[in-house]
């Protein structure tokens, strides 16, 4: 398996959108939009979509020099409820403001404001792209507490699929672990999916905690805290999402 930890050490010429992605500026798709808008320059010249960057060339995003080989950062965060996954600077409770991390990082998949638990934050655009591709069926596990007692019919319907947002959710494993609490594993990320599924079946979510993303588990990380992934965790993650 190709070790994705080598990505910051590559020296060959690369397409500009990949260069920007690996520098943690944005995803490749967003990079192409910035290039098309004329916001990216190579050696002082406005770049075009498809531009290839050589190792000796200088890339600017506005007035900022973009260095492709920034130290890769991948964090696991235990997001508290009330914190918003957004880069909107006017949002006081954004995850960016909350962490106040010294390197520019962003989320690799959202967790809604009212939910808490595991969130991945990174400056690696390729990792973000891979995590955001629904067709890859990445597993995400949640512990959910609802406001009334669970029934066998509710659990069966949740596992088979529920009609929400003009579609039917994918079948998924679900396990009752208490009178009001269950664990569910999703492989898609529809907007507020679990809450909408429960509401469609006459239930309200009291508490929702994400406990696992692919091979990364929340463990005993305290609410509001974060840490860098270990090399073993990161290699395992890349192996499963690539």
Image (tube, rainbow, N blue to C red):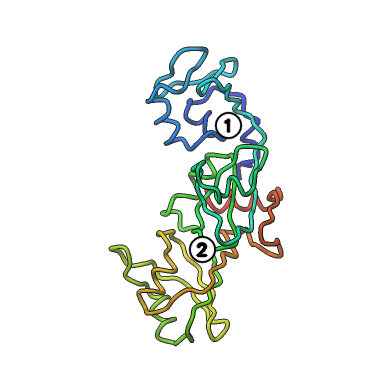
Figure label count: 2
State the CA–CA distance, disc 1 to disc 2.
31 Å
Looking at the picture, tell me which residue is in the foreground, 113 or 170. 113
Q: Between disc 1 and disc 2, whose residue precedes?
A: 1
| Residue 222 screen position, x and y as percent | 70, 62
Which numbered circle lies on residue 23?
A: 1
Looking at the picture, tell me which residue is in the foreground, 34 or 133. 34
Which numbered circle lies on residue 113?
A: none
What residue did someone put label 2 on? 114
> Residue 100 vs residue 164: left or right?
right
The quadrant of the rendering that contains the N terminus is top right
Answer whether labels 1 and 2 touch (C-beta < 8 Å): no
Which quadrant of the figure has residue 105? top right
Q: Residue furthest top?
A: 44
Secondary structure type for disc 2: loop
| Residue 172 screen position, x and y as percent | 45, 71
Please tell me which residue is depicted at 68% across the width and 53% down the height of the picture: 226
Secondary structure type for disc 1: loop
| Residue 89 screen position, x and y as percent | 52, 41
Which quadrant of the figure has residue 96? top right
Looking at the picture, tell me which residue is in the foreground, 194 or 72. 194
Please tell me which residue is depicted at 53% across the width and 48% down the height of the picture: 108
């Amino acid at each position: 398996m190709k070790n994705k930890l080598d990505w910051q050490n590559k020296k060959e010429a690369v397409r500009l959108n990949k260069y920007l992605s690996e520098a943690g500026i944005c995803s490749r798709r967003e990079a192409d939009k910035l290039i098309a808008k004329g916001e990216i320059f190579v050696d002082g010249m406005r770049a075009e979509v498809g531009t290839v960057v050589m190792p000796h060339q200088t890339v600017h995003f506005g007035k900022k020099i973009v260095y492709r080989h920034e130290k890769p950062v991948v964090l696991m965060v235990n997001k508290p409820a009330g914190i918003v996954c957004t880069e909107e600077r006017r949002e006081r409770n954004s995850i960016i403001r909350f962490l106040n991390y010294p390197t520019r990082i962003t989320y690799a998949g959202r967790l809604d404001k009212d939910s808490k638990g595991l969130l991945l934050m990174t400056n690696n655009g390729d990792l973000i792209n891979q995590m955001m591709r629904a067709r890859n069926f990445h597993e995400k596990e949640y512990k959910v507490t609802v406001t009334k007692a669970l029934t066998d019919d509710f659990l069966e319907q949740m596992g088979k699929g529920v009609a929400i947002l003009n579609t039917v959710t994918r079948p998924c494993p679900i396990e009752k672990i208490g009178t009001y609490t269950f664990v569910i594993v999703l492989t898609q990320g529809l907007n507020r999916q679990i809450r909408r599924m429960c509401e469609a079946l006459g239930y309200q979510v009291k508490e929702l905690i994400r406990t696992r993303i692919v091979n990364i588990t929340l463990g005993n990380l305290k609410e509001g805290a974060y840490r860098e992934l270990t090399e073993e965790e990161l290699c395992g993650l890349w192996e499963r999402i690539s």
